[in-house]
Image (cartoon, helix red, strand yellow):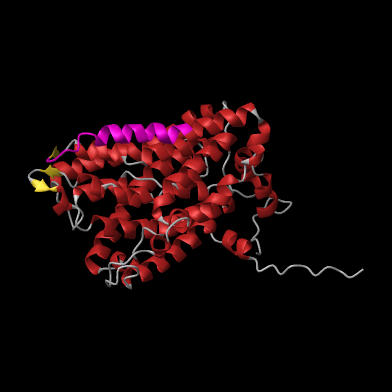
Amino acid sequence: MKNEKKPRNVGIWAFLNKIPAGTMFVPLVISAIICTITVECGLGTGVVGEGQTLWEFLGNPMKDLFGKTGQMLLIGLMLFCTGTMIKPHDFVDVFKRGFWLLLARLLPAYIICTVVWFTCGPKGFCGIDFITFTCVVTSANAALYMGIIPPYADNSDRAAFPVMLILSMPLLPFIFISSFGKISGDASGQTLAKIVQIFSLLIPFILGFILGNLDTKIREIFKGGNTIILPFLGFEFGSTINLINAFKPSVLLAALLLTVIFWAITMIIPYIVDKFALKRPGYASIGSSSLAGVSLSIPAMFSLYTFNGIAGNDLITNSVSILAFVLLITNILSPFFTKGIMTYYFKSHQKNKISDVKRVFESTHPELITDLYDENYVYKKIKK
């Protein structure tokens, strides 16, 4: 009997997993490059710089599978899969841990936005208008958070995903920003529509939560669901990024400054709370410090508004370009920041300090202890 020839293994998945959040990040970059080329070449329109993305040109199913139009569908699937993994007692830790992290993140952000409005007005500062500023500093990419934290997370971290996702949706920024402006057209139904969207986001999670707790087999089947979804979500986020617009000098300078401000607001206080108040390593606070793709949709909601007599359309001229760059750089670097924080944590908790690592990871990720430390609990460099 002939020995069967083993199929060739290229190792694509292994390569993706060597990169922090690589299963989402690599597809995001690939999609951004492809879509930038097709848009600038005028694909589907014949007009240079005003073309369609490759996914829009191909139509469905590619349009919804790889393009921005399918983001909410995949986010809904992630909510369902996440819901199946959550048990009732996990919510206790969400309110003990996740609530304080979200409060430490959002409360300073909205306070600073209010200060910017009263000191700088709607036009903001350094080319960053009030609408764009608020869209950035109040955002959190819950999907990327779910792509970063799996090596360290427990069910309590996962249970924070739907809460973070809801808070990163356009509803809160919309209500906040609109309170400073006036409607100049028929936009009275927008608030109701956003409230309905909140309930629409809750339903998949609640459905998954109910089914997962009624039948443990369902929980087992959907356990790896988010792993399958993340690469496709990466392609969809990448389709919203035009690399040409993101690297224009004026946009670049404004976006770089806003990125620094965003990280200062979303990292410093949340990390202090995570590390010293909640006694955690810090991966949750740092892992959520990236812009959500849905933030790019918020500025257009204010085209019918005026702010201190200035039309919303005049304020948001460069908003999407600035947001696209902040989205690009934060989604690229946030996984590496998280990896760096955790590497520092493990290196600084060797030998007689190993008890803290055991407290955090022994019951949920014992493989981290065996992989990262020798028999004397000395940190060792892992060869990949």
Q: Between residues 380 and 298, which one lies in front from this camera angle?
A: 298
Span colored in magenta: 184-203
**Residue, x 64% and y 35% (percent of image)?**
218
Q: Which residue is at the far right? A: 1
Pinpoint residue 384: horizontal percent, then vertical percent.
65, 64
Let me know if residue 144 is in the magenta part. Answer: no
**Residue, x 48% and y 39% (percent of image)?**
161
**Residue, x 9% and y 43% (percent of image)?**
308
The secondary structure that most of the magenta stretch takes on is helix
- Residue 303 visible in this rendered orientation of the protein: yes
Q: Between residues 367 and 201, which one lies in front from this camera angle?
A: 201
- Residue 333 visible in this rendered orientation of the protein: no
Let me know if residue 196 is in the magenta part. Answer: yes
Q: Quadrant of residue 142?
A: top left
**Left or right of 180: which side holds 335?**
right
Which part of the image, by quadrant, shows the N terminus?
bottom right
How many badges with numbers are in the image?
0
Q: Between residues 363 and 321, which one lies in front from this camera angle?
A: 321
Pinpoint residue 245: horizontal percent, then vertical percent.
28, 65
Q: Is residue 110 above or below residue 54?
A: above
**Left or right of 212: which side holds 284?**
left
Q: Is residue 336 above or below residue 155?
A: below
Q: Is residue 179 above or below residue 259?
A: above
Pinpoint residue 200: horizontal percent, then vertical percent.
41, 34
